[in-house]
Image (cartoon, rainbow, N blue to C red):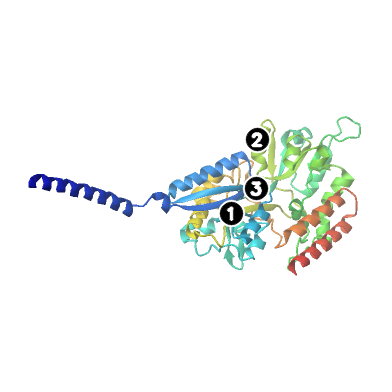
Amino acid sequence: MNKKLFSFLGILLGFSLVIVGFNNLFLSNPSTSSDIVTIKLSGWGASAVEQKLLKQLLQDFEVVHPAIKVKYEVINDQYMDVIKTRLVGEAAPDVFYLDALEAPFLMSQNVLEPLDSYIKPEFDLNDFEQTLLNSFKYENQIYGLPKDYSTLALFFNKQALSEKGFTNPPATWKELLSYSHKLTEDSNKDGRIDKYGFGEIAELARQAYKIKAYNGQIINKNGYAAFASPEALKGLQLAVKQYIEEKTSAQKTDVGTNSGSEMFAQGKVAMVIEGNWAIPYLKETFPNLEFGTAEVPTINAKKGTMVFTVAYVMNKKAKHKAEAWELISYLTGKQGMTKWTENGIALPTRKSVADKLGYEQDSLRSVFVAGVDYAIPWQIGKYSAPIINNFENQFTSAILGQQPLEKAMRKAQLEANKQIKTIEY
């Protein structure tokens, strides 16, 4: 009887120890899901190829950082308005895209986390193209790390130029005008032009380097519009004269297209100035089109182009800043940037990655890389919207011949500065 009782108690004790052991196991090793930190990343809509590539990159990041999960959100409409509203309402993402154009305003509003304290020597900050990195500096602090960029370059139809006896693309703006005359065709001889020499885009982002060519300014040192000066007008007059008087350039609406890339691809124009983003579009959509690229023709004996870049920035109120930095540093680190830019959709902001991928020797992309050394950053102060909107409204009117250029630009400058003063005060 005693033996049975002791045997039963022994079994019960053993069973109890097993249960305690299991309890201790769970207590000492809590569920991994409770350890995972979620970082929200927001960006704007892009091509299906780009979206797929980013999602793969984020999956790769999560493999390397199993304790961090990235929730990726695409904001398709009114991106900056949505971001600004969420920053005010404290519902902004931890990490998000920020265009260089919008950076000065947000950097001045104390809503972004300075990244200087997170950046370690091994991150190799000097590897970035300094022109691009400087676009995200404010009061000696770094607020964003550029993920990619593009300059502008001249795209030319090889067959069209060859048929007119041109063996090389134009190197100067004077040559571009001369080429445009010969390339502009009225094949039906009915007065209607079927093919233009050059595709003109009236946006300020495509006219700024012309303003700078004659030492004109878009804004002055106080951030007010200054594009109505005689120097600025001299550069802008190049586009107006070619379009109105010479009739050798066309805008996208003249030929029933939606972009410079499209009017070039469809053979409506023989030359156009576009960004690196046009290359995959042309190759995929118009595989039989023979085209080349060259640096933007010089104006007033000066090289000029624009550079557009976007950075990853951190919300100052992000709850998990260390993890947010891990995401930013991976995406803009050498490994992440190589994966992001190796298919040519975008150009790497790190010089070592560009060297590794051979873009300086690439027959189409080398001119974009060369341009970054002298490019004008697309960044025009804290109040870009009034400047851009007023410029483009009035410049479009001038290029269509509805009013003199000088009158149009003075009107645009006056109204832009009036609106800026209203915002400031």
Residue 147: horizontal and vertical position, in percent? 58, 52
Dot 2: element: helix
Considering the image in quadrants, where does the C terminus appear? bottom right
Q: Is residue 241 left or right of residue 98?
A: right
The disc, 1 or 2, on the residue closer to the chain's N-terminal end is 1
Q: Which residue is mark 1?
A: 96
Give me the residue at 80% from left, 37% from top.
256
Q: Which residue is mark 3?
A: 368
Residue 375: horizontal and vertical position, in percent? 68, 55
Mark 1 is on which residue type? Phe
The relative height of residue 363 versus residue 188 in the rendered view (above or below) is below
Look at the image and tell me whether residue 260 can be seen.
Answer: yes
Q: Nearer the viewer, residue 202 or 23?
A: 23
Q: Which residue is mark 2?
A: 283
Considering the image in quadrants, where does the N terminus appear? top left
Q: Is residue 340 left or right of residue 237?
A: left
